């Protein structure tokens, strides 16, 4: 992993949703703190998949606001982070790692986007904390042994 002053990180959708809708005030505050810190220093990344999942979750699953209000929020998120495309190469790479590792395809797409961009860290609650897959480490920022300093916050 890079030093904490240089760490870039990919945000999984679940972390972004905690910042927006967290039922747990501690998780909501931590997610927001990381998003603000990594956005302000241009070290936060998401993918087009994450934007689509965010929109879908906020509109369909959680029934939050109007579609246009949600769309404004998604635009704001896209403006705050570097957005990586989820094109054919990333999709095929994800399918390969999903087959080899038994991952769900959407989790594999998160990995493939980070791997393709050379990002060392994915912040997610969906993987085992500190799990490493082919050079990408998954950190659960809500785990008891996670320190914000690990990502330079």
Image (cartoon, rainbow, N blue to C red):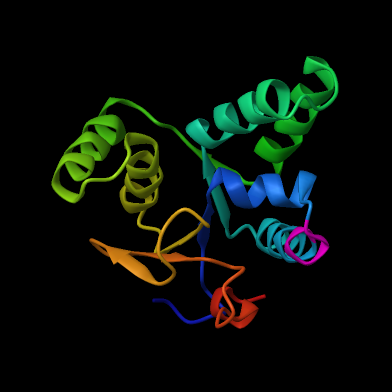
Residue 24: image x %, image y %? Answer: 78, 59
Residue 145 placement, left or right of 78:
left
Q: In this rendering, is residue 146 above or below 69?
A: below
Magenta-tinted stretch: 24-28
Identified at 47% across, 82% down, the residue is 3
Residue 6 placement, left or right of 127:
right
Q: In this rendering, is residue 9 above or below 112?
A: below
Rendered-image quadrant of the N terminus: bottom left
Residue 69: image x %, image y %? Answer: 84, 23
Dominant SS of magenta comes to helix
Identified at 53% across, 66% down, the residue is 140
Q: Choose top left, top right, bottom left or bottom right for residue 97.
A: top left
Front residue of 70/3: it is 70
Residue 16: image x %, image y %? Answer: 66, 47
Per the image, is 116 magenta?
A: no
Q: In this rendering, is residue 65 above or below 142?
A: above
Rendered-image quadrant of the C terminus: bottom right
Identified at 44% across, 69% down, the residue is 129
Residue 25: image x %, image y %? Answer: 82, 61
């Amino acid at each position: 992993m890079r030093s904490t002053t240089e760490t870039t990180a990919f945000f999984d959708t679940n972390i972004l949703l905690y910042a927006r809708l967290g039922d747990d005030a501690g998780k909501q505050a931590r997610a927001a703190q990381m998003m603000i810190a990594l956005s302000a220093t241009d070290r936060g990344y998401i993918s087009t998949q994450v934007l689509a999942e965010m929109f879908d979750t906020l509109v369909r699953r959680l029934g939050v606001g109007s579609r246009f209000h949600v769309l404004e929020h998604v635009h704001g998120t896209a403006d705050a982070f570097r957005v990586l495309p989820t094109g054919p190469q990333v999709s095929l790479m994800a399918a390969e790692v999903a087959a080899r590792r038994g991952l769900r395809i959407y989790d594999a797409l998160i990995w493939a986007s980070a791997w393709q961009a050379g990002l060392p860290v994915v912040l997610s609650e969906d993987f085992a904390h500190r799990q490493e897959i082919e050079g990408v480490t998954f950190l659960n920022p809500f785990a008891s042994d996670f320190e914000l300093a690990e990502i330079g916050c």
